[in-house]
Amino acid sequence: MQSTHKVFVSYHHVNDQWDREKFEGIFSTYFGIMITRSVQIGDINPLLPTETIRQKIRDEYLRNSTVTVVLIGKETWKRKHVDWEIGSSIRQTIRSSRSGLLGIFLPDHSDFGRDKYYPYIIPPRLHYNVDCGYAAVYDWSNDPATVGSWIQAAFDRRFKKNPDNSYPSFINNKSGERWYP
C-alpha cells in the first residue's frame, strides 16, 4: 500500500482550473492517494505585493506539502506563480523541507504538433529539474496506482538528488511561443 502524501498542485489558474479540479477529485477525493494543499482561486488577493504573495504561498500552502505536482497545459510555462511555486517547493529552509517534484502533461498539451517533452514549452524551472534528475514528467493518467507511484517516486527523490533552482525567478508572466535559455 502506498503512502498518502500532502500534494501541492501548481497549474495555470485561468486555463487549467477544470483539469486541476478533475485531478484533485480523482486522486484526493475519490481514491485518497493524496491530500491536496493547492491554492484555490480567491485564496490570495492578486493585488498584494509580490513578496507577500510569495511568502503566503510558501508559508501557508507549500510548508505542509511533501510533493509538488505541476499540471502542464499549453501556457503553464508562462505563469510567474507556477515558477515561484516550483522554486519555493524545492527550496530547503528552516521552516520547510523541500518537496518532491513532478510534472503531468494535461491531455491538450500535445496539440502543439511536436513532441510533448519539448523543453521550451514547459516551465523552465521544471525542465532544469528534469535535466538534473530531481523531477520527472509524465503523460496524464486516470489510474490511481500509476499516479500514486509517480508521487511516491517524487517523494523518494527529494533527498537522493539535489534540485536545480538556478533559473532566474520570473518577475512577470511571460509571453510568446516558448522560453529561451
Image: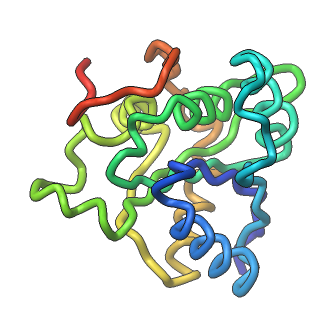
Specify whether 179 is left or right of 154. Answer: left
Determine whether 96 is above or below 71 in the image. Answer: above
- Pick whichever, 19 or 5, lies toward us: 19
How many badges with numbers are in the image?
Answer: 0
Look at the image and tell me in which quarter the N terminus lies. bottom right
Determine whether 17 is above or below 137 in the image. Answer: below
- Pick whichever, 67 or 30, lies toward us: 30
| Residue occupying image coordinates x 71% and y 52% | 41
Image x and y of residue 135, in percent: 47, 43
Specify whether 140 is left or right of 28. Answer: left
Image x and y of residue 141, in percent: 43, 77
Image x and y of residue 77, in percent: 39, 38
- Pick whichever, 82 or 4, lies toward us: 82
Specify whether 113 is left or right of 25. Answer: left
Snapshot quadrant of residue 27: bottom right
Look at the image and tell me in which quarter the C terminus lies. top left
- Residue found farthest to the left: 113
Snapshot quadrant of residue 125: top left
Determine whether 32 is above or below 153 in the image. Answer: below
| Residue occupying image coordinates x 62% and y 70% | 21
Specify whether 95 is left or right of 65. Answer: right
| Residue occupying image coordinates x 69% and y 51% | 8
Determine whether 106 is above or below 130 in the image. Answer: below
Image x and y of residue 14, in percent: 52, 52
